[in-house]
Amino acid sequence: MPEKDRIKKIGFANTTCRVCMGSGIVSSVGLKLREIRTGLGLTRESLADEALISPETIRNIEISKVRPRRSTMENIHKALGNLGADEEQLQEIK
């Protein structure tokens, strides 16, 4: 599928998304992670410290630059739980 068609399909054809920087390719996990993190008032650095991963890894997941390993997501889940996320929020990124 051509890039332009893929962008239109998910609705970023006429606007530049701050999360995906116009590529139109953002996973729902990345978007939900960012939404939960910012909703809890957490910085990437504070979440990364609690999850024992780098802030760059958090950023790359949020912008769908990487597909996280299961162990990384488990660390993020545990960290978010420790930092105040409820079970419903955690299920959204499972």
Image (spheres, rainbow, N blue to C red):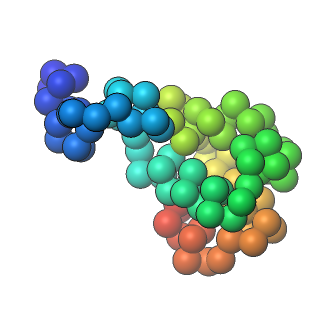
Q: Position of residue 15 (x, y in %)?
A: 28, 34
Q: Position of residue 10 (x, y in %)?
A: 24, 43
Residue 48 visible somewhere in the drawing: no
- Relative to residue 25, is residue 30 depicted above or below? below
Identity of the residue drawn at 43% across and 28% down: 21
Viewer-closest of 12 and 68: 12
- Decide if residue 46 is on the left or right side of residue 16: right
Instruction: List the single residue furthest toward the front.
Output: 15
Residue 20 visible somewhere in the drawing: yes
Instruction: List the single residue furthest toward the bottom.
Output: 87
- Decide if residue 94 is on the left or right side of residue 25: right
**Total numbered labels:** 0
Q: Position of residue 63 (x, y in %)?
A: 50, 36
Identity of the residue drawn at 47% across and 38% down: 19
- Decide if residue 1 is on the left or right side of residue 62: left
Residue 84 falls in image quadrant: bottom right
Viewer-closest of 12 and 78: 12
- Relative to residue 70, is residue 22 depicted above or below? above
Viewer-closest of 67 and 25: 25
- Decide if residue 19 is on the left or right side of residue 40: left
Identity of the residue drawn at 74% across and 55% down: 42
- Location of the N terminus by quadrant is top left
- Relative to residue 67, is residue 81 depicted above or below? below
Q: Position of residue 7 (x, y in %)?
A: 23, 33
Identity of the residue drawn at 17% across and 41% down: 9
